[in-house]
Amino acid sequence: MKNLLRILDKYKAALGCLIVAILMFLTEYNKIKIKNESDLSWVHGTLKNYSFVDNLPRNGKRYIIDLVEYKNQFQIYADHIGLFNKSGFQESVQIGDTISLQIPIRQVSLLDSENEIIMIAGMNNNTRNYLVSRQVIMKQQGPAGVIAGFGFLFAGFISFIVKYKGLV
């Protein structure tokens, strides 16, 4: 047991990088896949409430939309918040207005489920777009998660070699 702890202590940076790489790959594998507009469905409803929180721990943000017609909440994922026209939405949309949301077809079956949060991939009202689905799709298809995973894998490999060879 002491040997195992000694080995883990010696290679903790490499092990940490490996764990982060695995988590990055799992996240990328499990995220909702949107390849084109046909992977999305429209939901129309009356705005009941919204919450745009920008100061969560670790620079986190959470943007939630509630519609009168549905029990569940709709969320703009953190990766897409930069694409969202928050100020335009707040200036022109009032509680009680009708808005249209594009959601992944894969999540349509979750509509009206009380404890489900559904991804928003596009949002507009009759006059303005606030989140353009084409931009969300382009961002979804980007390789950032895979590149980061390989980066951590490479860093872990280098850390292991350096420790194994006794260079540090």
Image (cartoon, grey):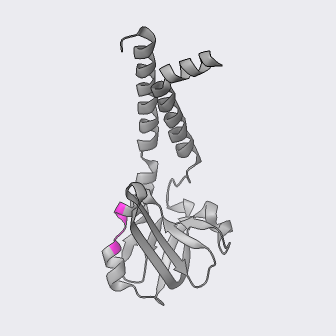
Q: Is residue 24 visible?
A: yes
Q: Where 52 falls versus 104 (above or below)? A: below
Q: Quadrant of the C terminus?
A: top left
Work out whether residue 126 or residue 66 is closer to the camera in this orientation and state it: 66
Residue 151 sits in quarter: top left
Relative vertical location of residue 77 with respect to residue 161 in this rendering, above or below: below
Locate the N terminus and report the quarter of the image it occupies.
Answer: top right
Q: Residue furthest bottom?
A: 96
Q: Residue 25's spot in the image, x, y percent?
A: 53, 38
Q: Decide if residue 91 is on the left or right side of residue 39.
A: left
Q: Looking at the image, which is closer to me, 96 or 44?
A: 96
In depth, the one of 55 and 98 nearer the eye is: 55
Tell me what residue is drawn at x 51 percent, y 53 percent.
35
**Residue 134: quadrant of the picture:** bottom left
Considering the whole magenta stretch, tell me its main secondary structure. Answer: helix
Name the spot of residue 7 as percent of width and height, x first.
55, 18
Residue at left offset 55%, top offset 81%: 67
Q: Magenta residues, as a range?
A: 82-86
Residue situated in front as seen by the camera: 35 or 165: 165
Image spot of residue 142 (x, y percent): 42, 46
